[in-house]
Amino acid sequence: VRTTGPETDEVLGLINNSTQRLATLYGRDTKIFTFSLGAQADHLVTKEIACSTNGMWTPVDDIYGDLVGAMASYYKLFTLGLGDDTEFTAWVEPYESFSAKKMGTTNSAPVFDRYVDPPLFLGVVAIDINLDALEQVLGEDARSSTMLQRFILLSTAMCPKIHLS
C-alpha cells in the first residue's frame, strides 16, 4: 500500500530540496538507504526515496527479517570506499553535550584489518571533544557557519561508485 497525499509529496520534496542544496553547497551527492520494516510497511515510498537519491532500499520481513544484518551490510558497503584511505576521519556538526552542557563535536575513523585484501572493516573508533579551546584558538563560535564549514571540509570521504542493476 502506498501512502498518498500531501504528506508523501512533502517528504519527497523535502528530500529532493535537501539533497540538491547539499550538492550545490558542498559538491557532494547524497545517497539515502532505506528499509521497509514488515509486511504492512509502505514499500513504494521508502523505495522511491532510495531510488531518487541513487541509494538502496531493503524490505525486512516481520518474522524472518534480519534488520541488524541488513543495516550492517549497508555499513560495509559504505566502508568499501574507505579501505584504502588511511587518512580519513569524520567530524560531527558541533552540538551541545548533554552531560557537560558545553559545545562539543565527535571525531571518528574506520578501523580496518589491512593485512588482508581488500581491507576488512572491523569497526569505528571515536572521541568526543569539547570545543572551548578550539573556539579560543580559531576565534570562532562553535555554532557559527564558519566553524561548521571547517568541519565539513575536514570530512571529505566519498562513497564508492557502485552501479547496480
Image: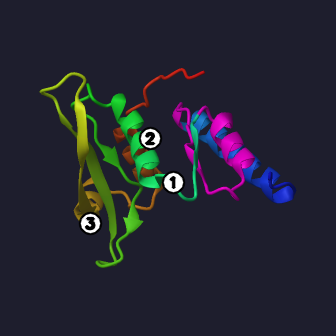
Q: Earlier in the sequence, mark 2 or mark 3?
A: 2
Residue 60 at what x, y percent from top left?
56, 50
Q: Earlier in the sequence, mark 1 or mark 3?
A: 1
Which residue was labeled with disc 2? 74
Which residue was labeled with disc 3? 132
Instruction: Please provide the residue range marked out in magenta.
Output: 26-54
Which of the pair 142/87 is nearer the observer? 87
Which of the pair 163/36 is nearer the observer? 36
Q: Nearer the viewer, mark 1 or mark 2?
A: 1
Image: 104 above or below 92: below
Q: Is 160 on the left or on the right of 86, as rendered? A: right
| Distance (Cα) linking label 1 and label 2 | 19 Å
Q: Mark yes or no: residue 14 visible.
A: no
Q: Earlier in the sequence, mark 1 or mark 2?
A: 1
Q: Quadrant of residue 37?
A: bottom right
Type of the residue with mark 1: Tyr
Q: Which mark is residue 64?
A: 1
Mark 2 secondary-structure assignment = helix
Image: 22 above or below 71: above
| Distance (Cα) linking label 2 and label 3 | 35 Å
